[in-house]
Image (spheres, rainbow, N blue to C red):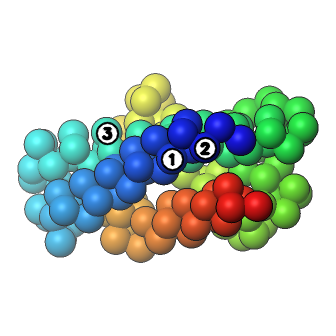
Amino acid sequence: MDREVVEQKLESLRRCVRRLEERCPSDIEGLTNDLDAQDIVVLNLTRAVQVSVDLASHVLVNLGEAAPDTMGETFRALARAGVIPADLAERLRAAVGFRNLAVHTYRAIDWQIVHRIVRERLGDFEAFALAIVARLGQ
């Protein structure tokens, strides 16, 4: 693996998670009523997902695995390769669904769901980063 590329992407992921922790209001009403917070949260959440997909793809290529057809399948492929647990792969795959909704505006964003993701699921990105760091050390 290209250590420098991986470390840059991990730093980008850390920065996104940090911004989400800092800028997401503590209550749903705060997020619902603050357009700037909404922009910051959606931007950093979609970036976190995209960076995670990029990292997953990089690892898969270095393992000699074929590139999956979809972004979400990238995480399942990492789980099959033993890099991340299957349950984490499924949660990250679901995050790709949010990313697609936010980027392509398939329907209106449900701010309660976004708030719950930020308050309850940021640990998934941290667990993913730790798995990548562990792989990098091998």
**Which image quarter: residue 92?**
bottom right
Q: Which residue is mark 2?
A: 3
Amino acid type for the residue under numbered disc 2: Arg
Q: Quadrant of the N terminus?
A: top right
Q: Residues within 10 Å of mark 1 (few under 14, many from 20)?
A: some
- What residue appears at the point 68 percent right and 45 percent down from the top-left corner? 56
Query: Mark 3 is on which residue type?
Result: Leu
Residue 97 visible in the displayed image: no
Q: Residue at x 80, y 39 (%)?
A: 62
Residue at the disc numbered 1: 7
Q: Residue at x 11, y 42 (%)?
A: 36
- Of residue 64 and residue 67, the one placed in the foreground of this image is 64
* Disc assigned to residue 43: 3
* Rendered location of residue 7, percent (x, y): 51, 47
Q: Is residue 79 shown above or below 85? A: above
**Disc 2, disc 1: CB below 8 Å?**
yes
- Give me the residue at 9% from left, 50% from top: 34
Q: Is residue 62 left or right of residue 72?
A: right
